[in-house]
Image (tube, rainbow, N blue to C red):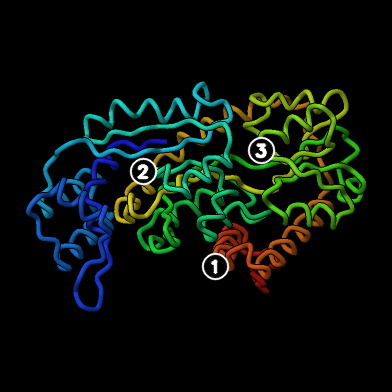
């Protein structure tokens, strides 16, 4: 995750303010104070705001050109470092790879006038509450939790919505385009970046649990904050066991649950081989593509600034993918459980029905499901859903 030069333009937060009908700009007191601090004497007019906004969204410019153009237009000059608190969810805390990657950027960002206070958290629920309370200016959390702040972006992780990495890359490219910028804002929050975390697979402690029918009566770990998971598990006759992201792997390793859905990157870090020994395995069929999302408070990170951050996240896609592939390669071949093609079709049907049900209940974004369906049809135009779309 690179937060590098793009955060240099955070002082230009005034560029994001919407022009009202009376040609005034709706700045909060905090934003007005930052404007005066970083650009003293600059008169922020609707015309200037529009010009800045156009520059921020102009992808024909390089990142450096966009920053320099905005500085020139605004009369911006560096003053005291801009301070922002970023809360990072990393199960391993300060010793974790996610936190270390973020911390490595802090010294470099000081050269650009941005002073980041990076706070590690081992509890994702605490990070979420601190973001809501304004203790964190931005927070890095899972896309599953991110749905609380932006249903559109939070639906990326929908069950079966994105069958492969290729589908995910196309989707994130679309979301990084300025044409999607408005979708990245919801209420008080803005999506600063979306990174892939790999596909989620089903880990089982018994190879015989290789069909939906065989899952009946088994204990399945479900996230305690996501009631729809428990509902879907119950529909196949299995028993949902409420857990959080930290306790679920422990329950699997200790035999409390028989089934766990998890990204491959967790295999070695969370020692999931302990839960599979001696007769378990991993069903070779991805349930969903998982994301990590950096979500900021809109009054601290205007959407024009967030646009540049989102683009930089996408530009780093290949680097993140390389790391994910390295972790996935650590899974020995003997753990994989192959399933018949007809069972895969059964899974596919079940997941589509689940998506539609969750859409109707208002849990999934209908627009995101439609976008995912269009991407699936782009890569596989002969699929039945392309001729008779229901999403």
Res 119 quadrant in image: top left
- Residue 46 picture location, percent across and down: 17, 68
Residue 315's tag is none
Q: Nearer the viewer, residue 299 or 362?
A: 299
Q: Residue furthest bottom?
A: 21
For mark 1, give the secondary structure: helix
When the figure is inspected, residue 365 is found, relative to residue 262, above or below; the finding is: below
Q: Residues within 10 Å of mark 3 (few under 14, many from 20)?
A: some
- Residue 198 picture location, percent across and down: 59, 40
Q: Residues within 10 Å of mark 2 (few under 14, many from 20)?
A: many
Q: Residues within 10 Å of mark 1 (few under 14, many from 20)?
A: some
For mark 3, give the secondary structure: loop
3 vs 1, front mark = 3
Label 2, label 1: how far apart the Cα atoms are:
24 Å
The image quadrant where one finds the C terminus is bottom right
When the figure is inspected, residue 126 is found, relative to residue 70, above or below; the finding is: above
Which residue corresponds to mark 2?
312
Label 2, label 3: how far apart the Cα atoms are:
28 Å
| Marks 3 and 1 close (CB-CB < 8 Å) | no
Which mark is first along the chain, 1 or 2?
A: 2
Which residue corresponds to mark 1?
367
Q: Nearer the viewer, residue 154 or 377?
A: 154
Classify residue 58 as left or right of residue 380: left
- Residue 56 picture location, percent across and down: 25, 55
Which residue corresponds to mark 3?
245
- Residue 346 picture location, percent across and down: 82, 57
Q: What residue is rendered at 69% in x and 27% in y? A: 331
């Amino acid at each position: 995750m690179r937060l590098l030069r793009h955060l240099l333009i955070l002082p230009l937060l005034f560029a994001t303010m919407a022009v009202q009908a009376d040609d005034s700009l709706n700045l909060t007191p905090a934003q007005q104070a930052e404007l005066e601090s970083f650009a003293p004497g600059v008169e922020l007019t609707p015309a200037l705001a529009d010009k800045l906004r156009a520059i921020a969204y102009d992808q024909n410019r390089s990142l450096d050109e966009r920053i320099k153009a905005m500085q020139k237009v605004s009369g911006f000059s560096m003053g005291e470092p801009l301070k922002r608190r970023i809360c990072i969810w990393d199960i391993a805390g300060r010793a974790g790879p996610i936190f270390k990657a973020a911390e490595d950027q802090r010294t470099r960002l000081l050269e650009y006038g941005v002073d980041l206070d990076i706070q590690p958290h081992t509890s994702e629920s605490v990070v979420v509450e601190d973001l809501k309370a304004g203790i964190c200016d931005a927070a890095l959390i899972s896309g599953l939790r991110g749905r609380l702040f932006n249903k559109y972006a939070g639906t990326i992780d929908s069950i079966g919505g994105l069958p492969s990495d290729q589908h995910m890359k196309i989707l994130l490219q679309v979301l990084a385009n300025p044409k999607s910028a408005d979708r990245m804002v919801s209420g008080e929050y803005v999506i600063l970046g979306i990174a892939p975390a790999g596909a989620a697979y089903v880990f089982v402690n018994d190879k015989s649990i290789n069909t939906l029918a065989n899952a009946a009566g088994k204990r399945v770990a479900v996230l305690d904050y996501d009631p729809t998971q428990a509902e879907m598990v119950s529909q196949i006759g299995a028993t949902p066991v409420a857990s959080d992201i930290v306790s679920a792997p422990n329950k699997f390793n200790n035999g409390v649950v028989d089934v766990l859905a998890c990204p491959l990157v967790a295999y070695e870090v969370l020692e999931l081989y302990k839960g599979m020994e001696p007769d378990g395995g991993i069903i070779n069929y991805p349930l969903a593509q998982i994301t990590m999302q950096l979500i900021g408070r809109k009054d601290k990170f205007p959407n024009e600034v967030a646009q540049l951050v989102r683009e930089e996240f996408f530009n780093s896609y290949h680097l993140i993918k390389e790391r994910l592939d390295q972790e996935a390669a650590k899974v020995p071949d003997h753990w994989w459980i192959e399933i018949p093609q007809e069972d895969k079709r059964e899974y596919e049907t079940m997941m589509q029905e689940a998506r539609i049900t969750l859409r109707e209940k208002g849990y999934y974004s209908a627009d995101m499901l439609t976008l995912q369906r269009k991407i699936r049809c782009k890569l596989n135009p002969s699929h039945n859903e392309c001729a008779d779309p229901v999403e």
